[in-house]
Image (cartoon, rainbow, N blue to C red):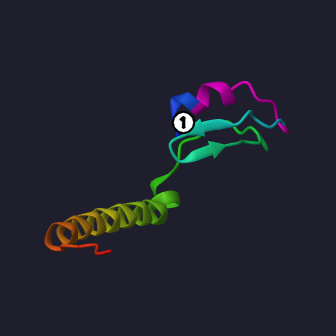
Amino acid sequence: MPALPAVLREPLAGLRVGEVSVPFKRDAGYHIFKLLAREPESEYKFEEIKDDLRQVVMNKKMEDAYRRWYERVRKNVNVELKN
């Protein structure tokens, strides 16, 4: 659970396998978790995750490029509403 924000990680730490959490209200909406299993944390070998890492970096670059493009468009477009 290290990838989860602390606000979610702490309450979920007490769940037992098969239990369902109470709903959590976050910025993106409500979240409900069901604990399916507990596995000890382990270290990953680079070779095991390099494709996933490549995809994460690519997605981040695409998001950044889209955000820059969108801001440029917003600055250069004038929308006028008429009744």
- Residue annotated with mark 1: 2
Quadrant of residue 63 in the image? Answer: bottom left
Image x and y of residue 36, in percent: 79, 44
Describe residue 6's horizontal placement relative to residue 81 as left or right: right
- Please state, as top left, top right, bottom left or bottom right, where the N terminus lies in the image: top right
User: Is 49 above or below relative to 1?
Assistant: below
Residue at (59, 32) in percent of width and height: 8
Describe residue 83's horizontal placement relative to residue 71 as left or right: right
Camera-side residue of 22 and 34: 22
Identified by mark 1, the residue type is Pro
Residue at (83, 35) in percent of width and height: 19
Image x and y of residue 54, in percent: 40, 65
Which element is circle 1 on? loop
Mark 1: give few (<14), some (14-19) or many (20+) Cα within 10 Å. Answer: few
Residue at (81, 30) in percent of width and height: 16
**Extreme residue in the front direction:** 83
**Magenta segment boundaries in residue numbering:** 8-18
